[in-house]
Image (spheres, rainbow, N blue to C red):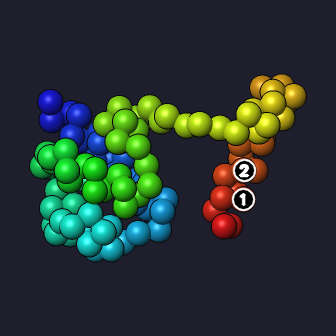
Amino acid sequence: MMAVYKEAGERILLMRVMRGYTRESLAELASISPKFLYEIETGKKGFSAIVLYNICKALKVDCDYILSGKEKVDYDQKLLEVLQLFDKNQTESISVILKSIYELL
């Protein structure tokens, strides 16, 4: 069971860094202490459903992703149609380009 908390903590840390939050700022948004957030991120402590909900709400991410690593994403149909025009090698390049654009925003 602790493996679930460790993996969830790693995903929370990753999303926090990707979103540009400090540990203190995310902890405040999630109504927990920075120390408790550190313990969650390092897998040293588990968390309740309400704590998970508050963290996910602050990070704007589904609880499913934090718990399982599987992200439920609803893509716009037009975007999917455009992406299907490319072959596998091209989509990998497009992925790199889109990630770069995201980092600029």
Q: In this view, does 6 lie above or below 99?
A: above
Question: According to the image, label 1 marks what residue?
Answer: 101
What kind of element bears circle 2? helix
Residue 98 numbered mark, or none: 2
State which quadrant residue 30 falls in: bottom left
Q: Report, in whole angstroms, how far the alpha carbon at label 1 lies from the one at label 2.
A: 5 Å
Query: Of 62 and 98, which appears nearest the observer?
Result: 62
Secondary element under disc 1, as helix, strand or loop, is helix
* Tag 1 and tag 2, C-beta contact below 8 Å: yes
Kind of residue at badge 1: Ile
Viewed as shown, does residue 13 lie left or right of 74? Answer: left
Q: In this view, does 94 lie above or below 99?
A: above
Q: What residue type is labelled 2?
A: Leu
Q: Is residue 6 visible?
A: yes
> Which of the pair 29/86 is nearer the observer?
29
Corner quadrant of residue 89: top right
Comparing 56 with 4, the one in front is 56
In which quadrant of the rendered image does the C terminus lie? bottom right
Q: Residue at x 26, y 72 (%)?
A: 28
Identity of the residue drawn at 76% across and 50% down: 97
